[in-house]
Image (cartoon, rainbow, N blue to C red):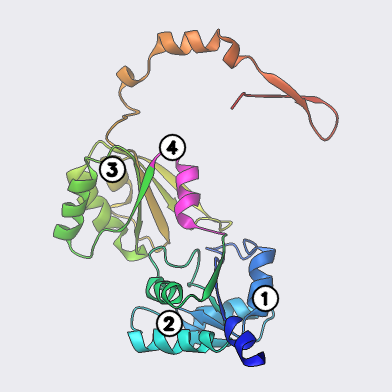
Amino acid sequence: MDEIEKKESGKLYVISTPIGNPEDITLRAMNLLKLSDAVICEEFKEGAKLMHHLNLDKELIEYNEHSDHMDVIDIVMAMKEGKKYALISDCGTPLLADPGLDLVKNCISQEINIEVAPGASSILTALVRSGFDTKEFIFAGFLGRTDSERKSKLKKLAKESRTIILLETPYRLQVFLESAKEVLPNRQAYIGFNLTHAYESHSYGTFSELFGQYKDKKMKAEFVVVFEGSGFDFSKEKDFDRDEVKKYKSSEYHKPRYGSGSDGKKRGRSRY
């Protein structure tokens, strides 16, 4: 009976970690890391840095794109025997442009309990900061290492009507922008640099404008790119119906609603 209970207690915690600002770690994430028998990380260096910051002494298991299927089997078998493991990436949410999918799939097939602790994500942080449409969007990952790969994928994304989010490595900013300005020269875009850090920065403009701004700059910064879909162009006045705006402003929907703030004073707030 004890052996059965032990085997049933194995678990995988999928834990989001800070993308830059170390304060962006949740209480739940810290508690689950404490409960874990070991922490599965992309690189020992990054995993050890997080453990040191949280004052935790945990066994680290390296798992990345160089790991093979047998490494996954070893981890899964240990959980089948009752181990509780935490899966983290170097930063942000695991599996999003990071290793871990094979491990999660095997845990599901072996009926190992999985608990996801959500948290920081550069993808959503950039989307919210971009100011582009958030009702529908897609995450297109990394474009590719060669110019032809980048342009080929950008040509497909050019037809996409939803907001698009991309990731790129720090040293490929100029070559990415060069490809983008050739395929989508007038498409409005946003680049978020070093998001959540005290020194984060933000740039807006068409891809042509952004290429001109950064083509001669030496940049070494983590960044995320968000650009508008093909269905809406902020630069075209035809998409901005002035009569509709006037009608909206004179309607009851635009009238402010009021609520009390913590100081007891009335605060205006929109309906939505």
Find numbered disc 3 in the image and state the secondary structure of the residue it sits on. Answer: helix
Viewer-nearest of discs 3 and 1: 1
What residue is disc 4 on? 135
- What's the amino acid at mark 4? Lys
What residue is disc 1 on? 54
Q: Position of residue 231 (x, y in %)?
A: 29, 31
What range is drawn magenta here?
A: 119-136
Q: Position of residue 57 (x, y in %)?
A: 65, 86
Q: Residue extending furthest front? A: 1
Q: Position of residue 68 (x, y in %)?
A: 33, 85
- What's the amino acid at mark 2? Tyr
The answer to whether mark 4 and mark 2 are in CB contact below 8 A is: no
- Label annotation for residue 207: 3
- Mark 4 vs 1, N-terminal side: 1
- Look at the picture and state if 37 lies above or below 213: below
Instruction: Give me the C-alpha separation between circle 2 and circle 3.
Output: 36 Å
Q: Which image quadrant for residue 168? A: bottom left
Find numbered disc 1 in the image and state the secondary structure of the residue it sits on. Answer: loop
Instruction: Give me the C-alpha separation between circle 1 and circle 2.
Output: 21 Å
- Label annotation for residue 63: 2
